[in-house]
Image (cartoon, rainbow, N blue to C red):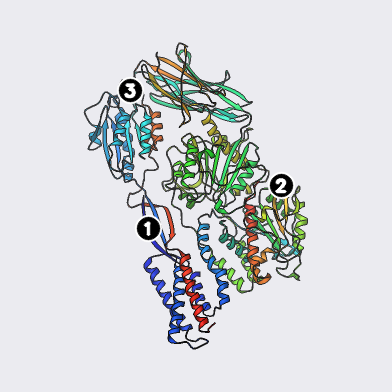
Amino acid sequence: MAPLGIRTFLEYIRFMSELTRQHFLRLIAAGGASFLGLNSLASAQQSLKGPPVPWGRLKFIGENGDQEDWHVHPHGDLNLIDSIRDETTVNLDKKWNVADVADLNSMAQYPFLFMHGELAPVLDETAQKNLREYLLRGGFLFAEDCVNGYNHHGSNRKNDYFFRSVVEQLPNILPGSKIEKLPMDHPLFHCFYHFDEWPHMQGTEWGPHGLIHDGRVVALLSPSDLHCGWANGDRWFGPGKQKISMEMGANIYLYAMTQAA
Amino acid sequence: MNSEQRIEWQLGGWSGLSPLLGWLIFLLIALVGAALTAWFYRHTLRALTWRQRTIFVTLRVAFLLLLLVCLASPMRVQRTYEADHDKRPLAVVVDHSASMTTPDQRGITRLSSALHAWKKVETDAIRSFALLRYFRFSESLHEASDLESAVNSSESGNGTHLYDSLNQVMKNAGPGGYGGIVCLTDGLDTTDETPEILGAEAAQNHCPIYFIAGQNQQSAHETLFVREMNVPGQVRRKSQFTATVLVEAHGLHERDVPLSLWQDGQSIAETRLHIRPGANLIPWTVPINSDQPGLIHLACRLGEGAEQESTAAAVRVVAQEQIHVLFYQGSLDWNCRFIDTALQGDASFQITSLYNPDLNLTRVVSPSSQPSTLTQLPDAMADLQPFQIVVLSNVYADQMSPAQQAALAGYVEGGGGLLFLVSDTTMARTFSGTELEKMLPVIFEAPPKGADDDESLRSFQELMHSLGGSNRTPEGEFASGAEATSGLDPLKGFAIPANSTHSKVAALFGSAAGGRLKNLPRFVTYARVHGLKAGAQTLAIHPDEETADKTPRALLVTQRFGQGHVTALLTDGLWRWRLSLPSTSHDPQIFWQQLFLALAGQRTSRTGLRFALQPFSASLGKTCLFRLSGAQGSGPPVITAVSPRGASRTLESQLDSSSDSWSFQFKPGEPGTWRIRAEDERGAQMETLLRVSHVSHAEELSGLPPDVDGLRKLAESTGGSLLNDGVPVTWSTTSSADLTTLVSKHSEPVWDTWIILLLALGFYVSELVWRRQAKLL
């Protein structure tokens, strides 16, 4: 496959022939300046990359013994990994790793686990014990509602079965912890990108909640389906939605990585 | 070092193209672009004249050409290589004085013994240096044509002008100087010169000195004494520290002598030292537990009966010592978070966390962290002084300015502790040739080629994009495949070097309450090391990987640098080890806390009272120079010399602010064993013994044993080593063909893309204006 630059150049020749004045001005604003900035930023980012760090998706069993819900839209994770690698200095390893909630050893390989589904997760005693142990050892869990990934509940964009289930289960799994809605001045929203409001893609707008244990946010629970924003946000939710969901995803990973004890 | 510069083109993603190929591709694309432009302008909304069409095509082609120039992005790349072998010559200097050439009762001379040791390393020396030059000296220096003429000279001088001769060798070197000096000697200079000037000259000229100590059984009499007793000046309560006693003996016959350590009048440890004929230098280490705050009085007794000697020291025990740690994270990973969590478990650690400002991170520190005005790594030594330990985690060399590196070097030289965390060989290699690299106890290898991204992931992403972002079947197939290949590399455990014991490492990492580390740390990634520097101590090694010369790969290495210590942990931050252990396990906490305590303890011991410089023996009429470091308080320490008959006399000292130590001189007035005692304002005490001999050091055949320890210390202060201990790792063991190692690579654009883009836009604006005038818009 030809390098990106060559393809861009050939497409540009055809595009420029029909370019109107308005389109040209839009191009200057959106592309011309960023073209230069992107070059220097990219080379600067590269020289700051640390050793590779991993990404893990958590496998679990859903309602009625469902064994597929957990892996909805894996390309969304890959898109986020690309974005974090390009826009931050985190050297996130581009590999879609799977950790099974039934196997603590597989979970313990990843300091950050992403749990995503539409159905309420069924966590038996082993799964609960493993989750508890994982969080106590220092792991971080990002659990997010997929709303209607595989349309288990039709195409209702307000589904929140997963979110409500984890909000109910996690404090019982980790005694001494509590669920709190995170205010917008929380460091999670300002550690890299700055957010004035929580980017909500779809689902019920409960807002982001943290599972707090010993003063530390050990898990982030989201009803807002940022992940679908990563997967195809602009097409499904409108222009700009993919970018903002990626930025929030970057903040979540960076916050988990750098939050002080 | 050699450097080369060339222009490389990066055509929109292709890098490393030569200029000729770059130009060819450039022209090809330009021709294609021009042809397509002309084709597109064949049919327009309105009919154009030939002139108009030419102008439009020209403007468009100019715009496209300039855009292509921006995409081409030629870079000026400068690569700096370091030759693996030193092209400067090596000077081989042979001590041909009488003490070296006089045989002992077996007919063996010190010179023949030194020559025998030289033969073992000569081949490596020839490989590492382009040329060897030979000299011999006794009271004056002479050049020799080869080793044989240097060794077999018929003249044996009646004096040893060691320091002066080596100074002359350095001064008379050709352009570029010598790459090193190897000296075969017994180290017994018969003048009043001291080695400090020689050491400073050698360091300034980047000329390491290597000694080969010649030894035999030539001795007028037997000697036995405690050369040094090394204890920290201050320790924490309920902790364990070690007292190291160094015994020097020169015997004519084999015998055993008792050695004991006493604490506050009670014997706490005993041993018997086996003395062999000839020179003996025997260390003895005793672990000691501290209890409540106060003073611990230690005494070391050597020998028995009338010949028994004792020397004394006092260690201060403090209730709580705040250990201030500056943790600087150069690039993002999970190190800081997990290490911070481990240290927060002990309130005596005060951690100041700093992230490289270029990471653009806004980090809120925890309430328990030390508030600090620092926003980046300090570039002044004074700003580092409040910290006992500085941690550099995943830092690239070009992230640190020369001022920052110099500040760190000065900080460590002055007694600070530096912990260098790196698990990536590429990152570590960037420090080669820098100021910081001189402090590090390791030499890094060239990095291996990194793995390319998995193309199948890109294909899957594009497939999902083309399917509209959601499709259960390919997602399920992808997830199944990923699950089957999921997982990271397995954890591997630290291993202990063969020449140390498990208890030694456990003593370093064990908890103050007496617990022991049940599990040694486990890691995944590590930085590859080519070798260790002279004087480096390996605390942990890779369990199964070795270097090319079959030595185990080092993982945790420490080395003294000036008054301080630099420790390199060459693995990841051990967070996977933490995650792999039950939440009830405290082993990771123990490891990190004890490692940091050990680093702080090294600084504490250096700030404790100790004789940084003392002669191992003296003779009547010789002025002895001492240097005392670690004295606390505003005024000078009280220094007393007690004669063999018990008479005391106070000695005056002078502050040397550059080394923060107190210097004093002493000329003994009678033979025998003198006690030199020092006490500072906080009550820390240290005592050393000075044996004054009837025999004058200025006598060539005084019978004094070779000063092996003195030679080793002098060599290490210049970056060299005692070759009796082995070949230095910095001497290449491979063929000295054109081996070069890439040290650094700097790229910068040949031209300013911004200006070219502005020009391109200018052409396009012009075209738009003309198109408007031609009513094409």
What chain does badge 1 belong to?
A: B
Quarter of the view holding residue B183: top left
Q: Amino acid at mark 2?
A: Gly
Query: How many angstroms separate mark 3 from mark 1 (CA)?
Result: 59 Å
Taking the image as shown, residue B507 lies to the left or right of residue A161, namely left
Image x and y of residue B378, in percent: 53, 43
Q: 10 Å neighbourhood of mark 1: few (<14), some, or many (≥20)?
A: few
Q: Amino acid at mark 1?
A: Gln
For marks 1 and 2, give the one nearer the viewer. 1
What chain does badge 2 belong to?
A: A
Residue to which mark 2 is pinned:
A215
Question: Can residue B450 be seen by looking at this rendering?
Answer: yes
Q: Amino acid at mark 3?
A: Gln
Mark 1: secondary structure: strand
User: Against B551, is A117 above or below?
Assistant: below
Mark 3: secondary structure: loop
Front residue of this view, candidates B450 and B518: B450
Image x and y of residue B765, in percent: 50, 75
Query: How many angstroms separate mark 2 from mark 3 (CA)?
Result: 71 Å
**Most distant residue in the bottom direction:** B47
Mark 2: secondary structure: loop
Residue to which mark 3 is pinned:
B218
Q: 10 Å neighbourhood of mark 2: few (<14), some, or many (≥20)?
A: few
N-terminal-most mark, 3 or 1: 1
Query: How many angstroms separate mark 1 from mark 2 (CA)?
Result: 54 Å
Q: Are marks 1 and 2 in contact (CB under 8 Å)?
A: no
Quarter of the view holding residue B287: top right
User: Against B156, is B528 above or below?
Assistant: below
Q: Are marks 1 and 2 on the same chain?
A: no
Residue to which mark 1 is pinned:
B5
